[in-house]
Image (cartoon, helix red, strand yellow):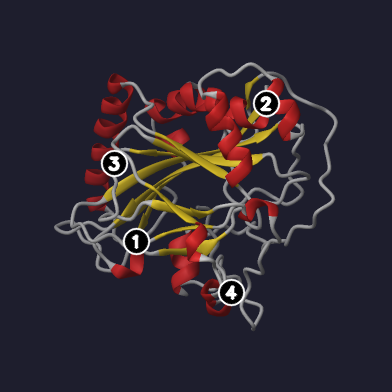
Amino acid sequence: MTPEDILKEPARVLTQAQREKYFEDGFVSVEELVPADVLAELQRVTAEFQDKSRAVSASDDTFDIGPGHSADDPVLRRLKSPDIQHDAYWNFSTGLMADVAADLVGPNVVFHHSKLNFKWFDASDTVKWHQDIQFFPHTNYNVLTIGCYLTDTDMSNGPLAALKGSHNEDLYNQYDADGNWTGMLSDEDAAGVDTGRVEYMTGKAGSITVHNARTLHYSPASKNPVPRPLLLNCYTSSDAKPYTAHPQPTRNTYKVVRGAHVIWAEHDPRPCQIPPNWSGGYTSIYAAQSGEDKTAGGMM
C-alpha cells in the first residue's frame, strides 16, 4: 500500500498528524503511550531477566553479553527474541504495538522479530549509523520497528536518533572495503551525515519511537551508569515478502497480528543490498559494529 492509501484507513492509536510525520520524516515518537500497568509488568519481567543474565559467562540464544560481564557486574547488551522469553513481551507485541503498526503499514500486519537492547555507561555501546532493511530485505519498504523506552530516556542515556527524510534517499553499503559485513555506514559515509536533519527521540518510560526500515538512525553512548532498556518490535505489511532467510526466526516469526494473510507481494522498484548468509546464526549489532565477530549480524 502507498502512504496515501494507508492514511485513508481509520487510525487505531496514532493521530493523523503523527501518521503524516512518519511518512514525511521516516520516523515518529509518541510520549508516554503505554498504559502504566502494562509498562510496570514489562519493567518487572525485564528486571528478572537482567538478574538471570548473571548466571551466564558467554552470549547464548537468550542473552548477548558485553565485555567484562560477570555475576557481580552484569553487562547485558540484549535479551534476544523476547517474544518467546515471556508472555508479557508477546502480549505487548500483539496488543497496542500491533495497532500502532497497523496505523503505519496498513491493516494487514505481520510480526517479524523482537529484541530488547540495553545501553550501558560505556562508549563502546554506541550504535553507529545504519539502516535496518539491509539486514532483512523485503519486496517493499512497508517495514518498521517500534521501540518502547522502559526507563526515562534523555540525552544522557543514549536516545534513538534518526535522519529526517533519509527513508526516501538511497540505501548505504553496510559492508567494509574487504567485503566484511559491519552493519553500519563507513566512517566516510557517516562523516557526510547532515547533522542538521537529525532528531533525537527522547521520552519518559512508556514513550515509543517508530522508524521505517530505510531510515538512517543511530544512538549515542550513554553517560548514565544505570542501563537504559529499549524494547523493539519489528512489523511488516503482509504484502511485503522477505526474500532472504530470517536470521533468527522464532515460533512467532511471520505471524499475522492484524488483518489477514496476503498472497500477492507488492514490489518496490528501488534496490536493496543483500546481507550475509546467517543460516548458521549471529550475535548482535554490537558485535558486528565493534568487529568482535566478522560474521556477526544484528538488527537495531
Indicate left or right for 283 with 268 as reference: left
The residue indicated by pointer 3 is 49
Callout 1, which amino acid?
Ala
Which residue sits furthest bottom?
Answer: 178
Vertical order, 90 against 162 (above or below): above
The residue indicated by pointer 2 is 7
The residue indicated by pointer 1 is 58
| Of residues 115 and 219, the one drawn nearer to the viewer in this rendering | 219
The residue indicated by pointer 4 is 189
Q: Position of residue 147 (x, y in %)?
A: 44, 40
Callout 4, which amino acid?
Asp
Query: In 3D space, how far apart are the residues under numbered discs 1 and 4 (Cα atoms)?
Result: 33 Å
The local crowd at label 4, few if under 14, some if 14 to 19, many if 20 or more residues have their Cα within 10 Å, is few
Vertical order, 37 against 236 (above or below): above
Indicate left or right for 300 with 189 as reference: left
**Which marked residue is nearer to the observer: mark 3 or mark 1?**
3
**Which marked residue is nearer to the observer: mark 3 or mark 2?**
2
* Count of numbered labels shown in the rendering: 4
Q: Position of residue 120 (x, y in %)?
A: 27, 58
